[in-house]
Image (cartoon, helix red, strand yellow):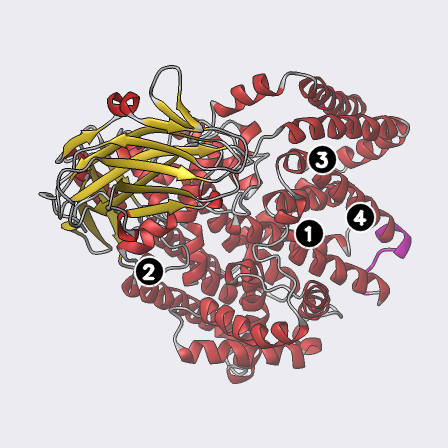
């Protein structure tokens, strides 16, 4: 049965991949507009900007590449079947050994040790559940809104933002399908892996050192403030940390045990780590360097040929599988975006300047909510572990030395600074190594208390874990952390606005406030059209969200969206929350007298310009470099403010400024005009709102609203309206 399955599965996988390749080729021949229309349905604003005709063409070449790779693989299908057969055959023995070791520990281990571990796990789970329902953070909201709630073909191919941790996005999507968009469901994958990190840390520490080191390091990891925070944040970092620790444990097993399935499992976990985020290269490289060093320096019971052979096969499987999984990303975005968030190669001088401060930030993050005494003990333990490595453990090559070698190499090659959370994969390893040194020193202190050794070390681990847990709980640093900035009162603001919003209202918010509001608007069944997905300047009232946590101002929010309050009343404080001010402003044209609209266009005078056939658009004609002018009669009063509102678009040939003014004989002043440069006008309609004051108007003269230019290109103006806003309050 196993042999039949082993022979069949590679063929099935090959056929599935070929079908995917053929599908990509076929889709690439479909009309672009047809394919784009189908993809647009699944985007937030109805427009998939990332999908282009070039991208569709690229899918054809990727599909052909997939088919060629499958053809090459088919030439060695028999060898693959044999390899897979031996791998599957070794699967039962692997799990049998794992089960045997687990039962042995449960049966023979000191009960105090086991009970301590259970209490530590209980505390760890409880404190993670406590923070699970904290307000959604900006990056979590962006991951869910733009990727995880979309169909998988969108979520797993769009790498427009590096926060799309693909395997984590896949897991969140599954959780969303089963449990909906509740906050706990969105965070469920991060929570599960955040909890699994704890027993995996125990396993690694016990395999590399001993059970006392395992218990102490587990206690510290369980109550680490930053690890708790990421266990309750819907990002893929706990997933990366788990896979990093898991392959470290497998590497220790593989170096002394013959088992093909364990090598396959090593490759699978590595693939999933890379598929979560390519930053897995950092931890994966550490483990590979340690394996190679252990083989070279003969720190193994197995032959070099066997280990090198399996290591190479595992590497090939890892890299080919990762490449195949990232093919949709290669279609959807540039691969260089998938490396690290701050993928900028610094100059040597900048790198040397920035690196120390970056390390200080990482250390501060790792030690948040940890008393300074404990931090010092961890440092002492770390260096003690390195100095007395041979006395503490029986393996030759310190894994921290492999980490230093590989990370130094990568940093010197990339000269790029990872964000602080990018180094979290290294935190459990640091804690394990430090705990080994601390246990060694404590062993010297309590050398005469061997009969109570397990009890003493269990009490120390328990007190440390519970103490750190209480510190995290009472400090509330996770809740107030700006590690993943947000609008903390987003749900309360949403509920308040729900009972005040009217048709025609708009809400203006910028990061990190906008996407949490989108999430909670969807949760409370409020249309996200209020959040600037429709025309801002046609709104009757505007609510502006000013985020206190990042010291935002109204101007900051407006500048982000390239908006102006010209034509709106002075913003007034509408409501205040702990994390935000809510301001309200009214559109003046809805409180003003309309004195010109499209009905007056036909009364105008046109020179090298004209009206459209429906008389609703003013067209500045394309042609020679000579004056093009449109004058529309208008009645105005002295000392009056007039709001001018219109939409304008250009052709690519527009090459000169367009002027707009209030004009008449002996009435032509610079302060009564404004202009638009060609670069300020796009090829799609752009809303323009300006206010002009009439100043002193001479009596008994004809006054016009004038538009003129010397451009050779074409421009089209529509929805031109002028309002008398003197009686309204302006900002």
Residue at screen point 36% across, 37% down: 707
2 vs 3, front mark: 2
Report which residue position mark 1 lands on: 250
User: Secondary structure under badge 3?
Assistant: helix
Label 1 with label 3: CB-CB less than 8 Å: no
Mark 2 to mark 1 CA distance (whole Å):
43 Å
Report which residue position mark 4 lands on: 258
Answer with mark 2 or mark 3, whichever residue precedes in sequence: 3
Does residue 106 belong to the magenta stretch? no
Question: Which label belongs to residue 44?
Answer: none
Q: Position of residue 368 (x, y in %)?
A: 41, 68
* Front residue of this view, candidates 66 and 389: 66
- The boundaries of the magenta stretch are 299-307
Question: Which label belongs to residue 324?
Answer: 3
Q: Position of residue 24 (x, y in %)?
A: 69, 23
Mark 4 to mark 1 CA distance (whole Å):
12 Å
Label 2 with label 1: CB-CB less than 8 Å: no
Q: Tell me which corner region of the image, top left, top right, bottom left or bottom right, holds residue 81.
A: top right
Q: Is residue 250 visible?
A: yes
* Front residue of this view, candidates 119 and 608: 608
2 vs 1, front mark: 2
How packed mark 4 is, by other alpha carbons closer than 10 Å (few <14, some 14-19, many 20 or more), is some
Label 2 with label 3: CB-CB less than 8 Å: no
Q: Tell me which corner region of the image, top left, top right, bottom left or bottom right, holds residue 370.
A: bottom left
User: Secondary structure under badge 2?
Assistant: loop
Question: Which label belongs to residue 550?
Answer: 2
Answer with mark 4 or mark 1, whichever residue precedes in sequence: 1
Answer with mark 2 or mark 1, whichever residue precedes in sequence: 1
Q: Is residue 581 above or below residue 535?
A: below
């Amino acid at each position: 049965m196993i042999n039949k399955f082993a022979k069949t599965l590679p063929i099935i996988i090959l056929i599935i991949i070929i079908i995917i390749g053929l599908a990509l080729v076929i889709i690439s021949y479909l009309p672009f507009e047809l394919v784009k229309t189908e993809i647009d349905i699944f985007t937030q604003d109805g427009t998939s900007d990332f999908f282009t005709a070039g991208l569709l063409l690229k899918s054809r070449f990727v599909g052909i590449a997939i088919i060629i790779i499958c053809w090459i693989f088919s030439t060695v299908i028999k060898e693959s079947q044999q390899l897979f057969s031996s791998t599957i055959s070794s699967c039962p023995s692997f799990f049998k050994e794992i089960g045997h070791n687990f039962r042995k520990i449960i049966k023979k281990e000191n009960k105090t040790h086991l009970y301590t571990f259970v209490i530590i796990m209980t505390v760890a789970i409880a404190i993670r559940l406590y923070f699970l329902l904290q307000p959604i953070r900006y990056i979590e909201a962006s991951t869910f809104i733009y990727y995880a709630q979309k169909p998988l073909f969108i979520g797993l191919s769009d790498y427009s933002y590096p926060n799309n941790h693909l395997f984590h996005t896949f897991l969140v999507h599954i959780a969303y399908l089963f449990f909906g968009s509740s906050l706990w469901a969105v965070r469920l994958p991060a929570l599960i892996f955040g909890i699994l990190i704890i027993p995996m840390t125990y396993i690694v520490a016990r395999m590399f050192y001993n059970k006392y080191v395992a218990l102490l390091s587990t206690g510290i990891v369980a109550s680490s403030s930053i690890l708790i925070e990421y266990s309750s944040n819907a990002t893929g970092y706990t997933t990366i940390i788990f896979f990093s620790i898991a392959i470290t444990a497998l590497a220790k097993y593989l170096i002394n045990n013959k088992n093909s399935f364990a090598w396959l499992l090593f490759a699978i976990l590595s693939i999933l780590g890379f598929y979560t985020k390519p930053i897995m290269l950092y931890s994966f490289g550490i483990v590979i360097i340690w394996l190679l060093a252990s083989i070279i320096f003969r720190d193994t019971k197995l032959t070099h040929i066997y280990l090198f052979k399996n290591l190479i096969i595992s590497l090939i499987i890892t890299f080919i599988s990762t490449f195949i999984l990232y093919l949709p990303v290669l279609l959807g975005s540039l691969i260089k975006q998938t490396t690290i968030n701050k993928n900028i190669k610094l100059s040597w001088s900048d790198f040397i300047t920035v690196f120390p401060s970056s390390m200080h930030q990482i250390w501060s993050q790792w030690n948040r909510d940890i008393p300074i005494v404990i931090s010092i003990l961890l440092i002492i333990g770390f260096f003690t572990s390195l100095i007395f490595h041979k006395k503490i453990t029986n393996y030759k090559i310190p894994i921290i030395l492999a980490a230093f070698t590989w990370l130094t190499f990568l940093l010197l090659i990339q000269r790029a600074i990872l964000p602080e959370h990018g180094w979290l994969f290294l935190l459990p390893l640091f804690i394990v190594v430090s705990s080994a040194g601390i246990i060694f020193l404590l062993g010297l202190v309590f050398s005469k208390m061997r009969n109570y050794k397990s009890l003493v070390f269990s009490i120390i681990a328990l007190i440390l874990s519970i103490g750190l847990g209480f510190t995290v709980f009472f400090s509330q640093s996770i809740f107030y952390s700006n590690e993943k900035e947000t609008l903390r009162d987003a749900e309360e603001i949403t509920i308040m606005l729900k009972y005040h919003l009217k048709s025609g209202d708009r809400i203006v918010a910028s990061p990190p406030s906008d996407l949490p509001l989108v999430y909670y608007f969807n949760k409370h069944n409020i249309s996200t059209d209020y959040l600037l997905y429709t025309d801002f300047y046609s709104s009757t009232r505007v609510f502006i969200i000013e985020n206190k946590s990042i010291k935002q101002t109204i101007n900051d929010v407006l500048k982000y969206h390239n908006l102006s309050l010209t034509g709106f009343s002075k913003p007034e404080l509408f409501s205040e929350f702990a994390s935000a001010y809510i301001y309200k402003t009214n559109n003046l044209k809805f409180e003003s007298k309309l004195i010109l609209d499209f009905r007056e266009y036909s009364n105008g005078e046109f020179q090298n310009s004209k009206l459209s056939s429906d008389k609703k658009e003013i067209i500045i004609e394309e042609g020679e470099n000579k004056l093009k002018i449109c004058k529309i009669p208008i009645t105005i009063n002295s000392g009056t403010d007039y709001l001018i509102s219109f939409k304008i678009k250009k052709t690519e040939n527009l090459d000169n400024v367009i002027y707009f003014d209030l004009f008449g004989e002996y009435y032509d002043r610079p302060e009564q005009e404004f202009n638009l440069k060609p670069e300020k006008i796009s090829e799609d309609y752009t809303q323009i709102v300006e206010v002009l004051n009439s100043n002193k108007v001479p009596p008994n003269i004809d006054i016009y609203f004038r538009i003129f230019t010397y451009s050779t290109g074409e421009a089209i103006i529509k929805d031109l309206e002028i309002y008398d806003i003197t009686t309204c309050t302006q900002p």
